[in-house]
Image (tube, rainbow, N blue to C red):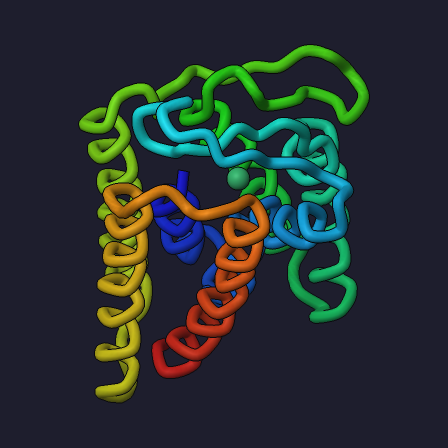
Amino acid sequence: MFLGHFGLGLAAKKAAPAVSLGALFAAGQFADLLWPTLVLLGVEQVRVQPGITAVAPLDFVSYPYSHSLLMLCVWGVAFGGIYVALRGARAKAGVVLALLVVSHWVLDYVSHRPDMPITPTGAARVGLGLWNSVPGTLVVEFALLGFGVAVYLRTTRARTRAGAIGFWSLVVFLVIVYLASTFGPPPPSATAVAWSAQAMWLLVAWGYWVDRSRS
Ligand SMILES: [Zn+2]
């Protein structure tokens, strides 16, 4: 899942208007921000295997720390708690951020084949396998993004032209990156997958920047 995580981050603005879109993106994508670094360190493993699902050519061999349900609950509580402590934010903002961190597992559970761990050490792997259907995946991804964009636009207003242009260029960029990775050639190696996934940090920064020029 890619666009769906950003869709929920955008929609969460309604529940936590004081929290920047950058922080909401970082929470919803926390698992995928942590994952490439763990892959590059050799702590977690992924293999490129074209055809393993219709959508993503990736075999997630092991990702207990970034993608198990239990660890995402732990990361969620830590993320929300640290945000509230550092920013002096309301508890509700912390709860929204924690739920976003955990929502990553739920959306990935829907998309992935049964490779999602429940606990970091247990053998159980689950996944509903939406990625076995290209049309089904596109409908869910774009529906979640569209929902998020609609809620965010109703919740915030651009104060400057940059606020409008920055927002729409972010949406277009997300869609282009998504379509290119879905319909483009498979990545050459697991290391290439991990390095390109590090670009996710750019989207967090973009979220902060867009949010600053909207109210
Ligand atoms: Zn993920």
Q: Position of residue 125 (x, y in %)?
A: 62, 14
Q: Residue at x 36, y 24 (%)?
A: 51
Please indicate, yes or no, whether residue 97 appears anywhere in the rendered image.
Answer: no
Classify 163 as above or below 66: below
Lateral position of residue 10 relative to residue 180, left or right: right
Classify 69 as above or below 40: above
Q: Position of residue 135 (x, y in %)?
A: 18, 27
Q: Residue furthest right?
A: 121
Classify 159 as above or below 67: below
Q: Nearer the viewer, residue 89 or 86?
A: 86
Q: Tell me the quarter of the image containing the C terminus.
A: bottom left
Q: Residue at x 52, y 54 (%)?
A: 192
Please indicate, yes or no, whether residue 123 appears anywhere in the rendered image.
Answer: yes
Lateral position of residue 27 relative to residue 141, left or right: right
Lateral position of residue 177 relative to residue 67, left or right: left
Q: Residue at x 70, y 61 (%)?
A: 83
Q: Tell me the quarter of the image containing the N terminus.
A: top left
Q: Position of residue 97 (x, y in %)?
A: 59, 50
Q: Residue at x 76, y 69 (%)?
A: 86
Q: Nearer the viewer, residue 99 or 46?
A: 46
Lateral position of residue 167 relative to residue 94, left or right: left
Q: Residue furthest top?
A: 124
Q: Position of residue 64 (x, y in %)?
A: 72, 31
Q: Nearer the viewer, residue 112 or 107?
A: 112
